[in-house]
Image: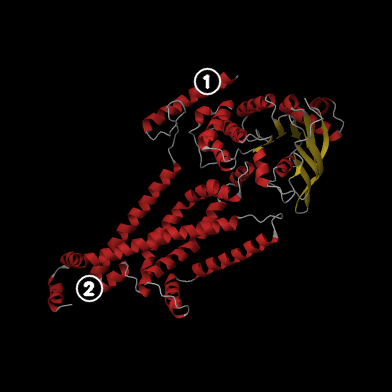
Amino acid sequence: MNIPIMLAANSRNFWEQVVYLVQMGGKDFLQGAEKTILLAVVGTVIGCLIGFLIGLVQTIPIQPRDNLVKKIFLKIVRIIMAVYIEVFRGTPMIIQAVVIYYGSQQALGINMTAMFAGFVIISINTGAYMSESVRGGIESIDRGQTEAAKAIGMTHFQTMFSIVFPQALRNILPQIGNNLIINIKDSSVLMIISVAELFYATRTLAGTYYDTYGPFLIASVIYLSMTFPCSRLLRWYEKKIDGPDSYNLAGTNTKGMPVKNRRSSGLTMQMLNRKHSGQRSAMR
Amino acid sequence: MRNDNKAPVIEVRHLVKNFGKVEVLMDIDFKTYPGDVICVIGSSGSGKSTLLRCINLLETPTGGDIIFNGKNIMDRKTSVTDYRAKVGMVFQQFNLFNNMTVLQNCMTGQIKVLKRSKKEAEETAMKYLTQVGMDPYINAKPHQISGGQKQRVAIARALAMEPEVLLFDEPTSALDPEMVGEVLEVMRELVQNGLTMIIVTHEMAFARDVSTRVVFMDKGVIAEEDTPEVIFNNPTNPRTKEFLARFMHDQ
């Protein structure tokens, strides 16, 4: 902190000041943004895994023919999961951060870095929300899908992993996108345990240059430029999962691969009807 | 057709199913021999579908036994998944896997349950898809094909598991009249191939033509069970007469 810079701040107009801040603090902003995106992405991915794991356990059917140990074990696990969801959805993340970070030091003697604590906090917080989304996603899948899978002899886990989860995942993708964007923004609460993410970096820069408005305006632009591509990327992924609108009749291409080309798939719709009627009469 | 010297494939003994206090099935007994085509008829709510779902354990029976090739599948030690792999099921609502193409629908069970190689699974799937006339549509997703086509794929999916018995739960009830024909045609072909089938249906003409025996269910019990000739021409039970008279009248 030196006096010439502070004096110079008064002599620059607003835009000159912004350019100056980007030049001087650009590296700090970027380092902060990098941590923010890392925290958000890792936290969302692990949170989703927690969500699916809980969804999987919650849907295990308890049947009269099951043995007692399995029944009791499942009951206990489900109670623990219910408590987890209620506690982490029902308290602010900023308080969870303090309790987990300082609590683990004071009460349990575990020393973790602030960054590691950040990953843990975002993951388990997202997990609590995601497990409810996953439950909704699983419930939205028609029971007939499960019944058909069971009728060909699939186990509960096979049914879940190959039939129900892929469809549930598609249905909750918008929710996952929501969580990712929320995590990009809400990771800012981790400044309370001094994780040097974007908000923390911005606050430091504001102090350094005696300017609040400039750094926070720049930070808001950086936040937006992280959230916007994420939401577009997820929208694109949704479309990709849905697959092409039309399909190719076997025989019209030799490898039996789905056709992505619009022109040729348009052709197949007409051929389909023609071929269909021919097919039926050939069978008789 | 029927050979009484053979042991039954599926034998249902004193089967009872309650939903809460409602008794849906009361003391059901019947046997299915290899090569049998049993059509189960009766008015809605008579317990036909529940019976079929109990046989496949999609509903847990409240009481009674189901014997499959001499093994009691109600016994805890019997593997439900192994049993289901040998007893196929075709649903009223098709229930094709929406996240898979037609071909994948017919392959996934073979790979996951029967542990067949991908190549073998594809060959088997293609064989049965060709049989039901759906081989040109292997790349389509379920939402892209018609109801009749879906049901034919569902039949191919069940056949690809090469089951000993195939159960049909009102396979044509969700189809419009034009599509009923194409599905029944496929099913007639299966009858000719000698597949053992239990069919819950409202298609009386079909039941009369193809079945080796007809089971008439009424209010949770088997009211009458006999050859199609007897059931359709000389039913003894007054309820059977009444049901068929009303049905023929509607036709």
Residue B202 in view, yes or no: no
Q: Is the residue at mark 1 from the same chain as the one at mark 2?
A: yes
The image quarter containing residue A205 is bottom left
Q: Of B10 and A141, which appears nearest the observer?
A: B10
- Residue B240 at x, y = what percent? 82, 33
Q: Residue at x 30, y 57 (%)?
A: A225
* In this picture, residue B87 sits left or right of residue A56: right
- Residue B15 at x, y = what percent? 79, 45
Dot 1 amino acid type:
Gly
| The N terminus of chain B sits in image quarter | top right
- Residue B241 at x, y = what percent? 83, 31
Local secondary structure at mark 1: helix
Disc 1 is attached to a residue of which chain?
A: A
- Residue B43 at x, y = what percent? 76, 37
Mark number, residue A278:
1
Disc 2 is attached to a residue of which chain?
A: A
State the residue position of label 2. A211
Q: Please say if B82 is above or below A94.
A: above
- Of mark 1 and mark 2, the one earlier in the sequence is 2
The image quarter containing residue A216 is bottom left
Dot 2 amino acid type:
Asp
* In this picture, residue A226 sits left or right of residue A278: left
How far apart, in angstroms, are the residues tagged by discs 1 and 2? 77 Å
Q: Of B181 and B16, which appears nearest the observer?
A: B16
Q: Please say if B120 is above or below A241.
A: above
